[in-house]
Amino acid sequence: MIDLALLRDAPEIVKRSQEARGESADSVDAALVADRERRAALTAFEELRAAQNAHGKTVAKAAKEDKPALVAEAKQLSDRVKQAQQAVTAAEQAADAALAKIENIVLDGVPAGGEDDFITLRTHGQPAAFDFEPRDHLALGELLGAIDMERGAKVSGARFTFLTGIGARLELAIMNMGLDRALAAGFIPVIPPTLVRSEVMRGTGFLGQHADEVYRLDDDDLYLVGTSEVPLAGFHMGEILDLTRGARRYAGWSTCYRREAGSHGKDTRGIIRLHQFNKLEMFVYTTPEDAEAEHLRLVEMQERMLQDLGLSYRVIDVAAGDLGSSAARKYDVEAWVPTQGAYRELTSTSNCTTFQARRLDIRHRPPVEGGGLGKTAHVATLNGTLATTRWIVALLETHQRADGSVWIPEALRPYLGGLEIAEPIA
């Protein structure tokens, strides 16, 4: 949720942010009204409670003959207090619903607009060129005995696959390469739960506009996560962190699940858009002042991975309307996929400022001038992909050879027992 002080004191900033996202500024006015009504209801309740407490003392001190009338008044006052309490509950629920429609405040410089309004910040490498007709990743995966979509569909349905042989080894190699780099950068490795409670899913912003992407177990009121960002955000829920020695950095390795609702007819061939995949996700808790520098650091780690895998890519500054509710700025790194003649997203990294931490009540005590620590303040949270199943797509297509074999980048070979060329199976 956004800072209520900002909403009350500078609603025009919030309106501009909503409009940049393509949302109506009317939601800001509605939230202000709901916030005022909530505060008014709470004030009325507290005044009645104070009157009730004062009246109780009067009854206790009253003469015997005066008490029946005073007790009757006390009952009436009690009924009014209960009604006021119910009004507070209703007003709080209405305010929560209104505030939930206000998304994180986009940072200065984020392009306005939707999915196609991003800004390309830089490109790296030249798109792969071939003197033969290149195969797509599925054709290569079948030749190599790496990808089996047919059996995936037989066992689980559309958008599921078996990664077999070199396919399974490639995924583990990419993930382990990413994990080693995360460790070297001071990240703590985590294998988190992939089922989370509703308050955690809601706190990270995935039960808003992305709710139809989430798998839910109705009988248990638990959700399957689409990224380990979710359990890692909930890891310190309700805590006060010590950030005086620097940021808290975690690298979560997990299986992820997405319903891919609304993607019918898109990327139906191969493993670009699956219901189940593995991902190594970086997650950082830091101070709001250090969040922007930390964001750039995550992007740099992602770029180094793709460079060492020999992939051509571009870095884009995602437009406000494509950020998702929690992100204030997001950078995507998109690799060139030769047979599609297009860049496709391999990594995404978001600065969520204090938006998630406010919902999940995660704070720190900033140092104050003269020494010591000040009042608690919300932390900033950031997340970014460092490896995932989809990378196999760009890797196979970029490094393929005419006979269907695939060259293995040198940086990946130590994770594959020194393998230099992945050969088609007999």
Image (cartoon, grey):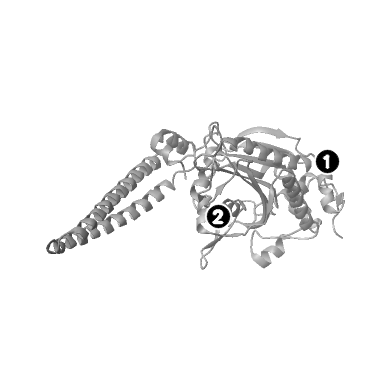
Answer few, some or many: residues within 10 Å of disc 2's Cα (few below 14, many 20 plus, some between 14 and 19): some
Check the image and report above or below for 251 versus 158: above
**Does the rendering let one see residue 136?**
no
- The label shown at residue 131 is 1
Query: In front: mark 1 or mark 2?
Result: 2
- Name the side, left or right, on which 224 lies relative to 133: left
State the SS at label 2.
helix
The quadrant where residue 80 appears: bottom left
- Name the side, left or right, on which 119 lies relative to 417: left
Which one is nearer the viewer's eye here, 147 or 303? 303
Q: Amino acid at mark 2?
A: Glu
Q: Residue furthest left?
A: 65
- Name the side, left or right, on which 369 lies relative to 184: left
- The label shown at residue 213 is 2
The quadrant where residue 345 appears: top right
Task: Look at 81% across and 41% down and name the residue there.
Answer: 130
Which one is nearer the viewer's eye here, 65 or 366? 65
Comes first in the chain, label 1 or label 2: 1
Real-space Cα separation, disc 1 to disc 2, in angstroms: 41 Å
Q: Amino acid at mark 1?
A: Asp
Q: Residue 111: image x %, image y %? A: 55, 33
Task: Look at 18% across and 62% down and name the residue there.
Answer: 71
Quarter of the image with the C terminus is bottom right
Q: Residue 138: image x %, image y %? A: 74, 54
**Does the rendering let one see residue 127?**
yes
Q: Residue 289: image x %, image y %? A: 57, 35
- Name the side, left or right, on which 160 lies relative to 143: left
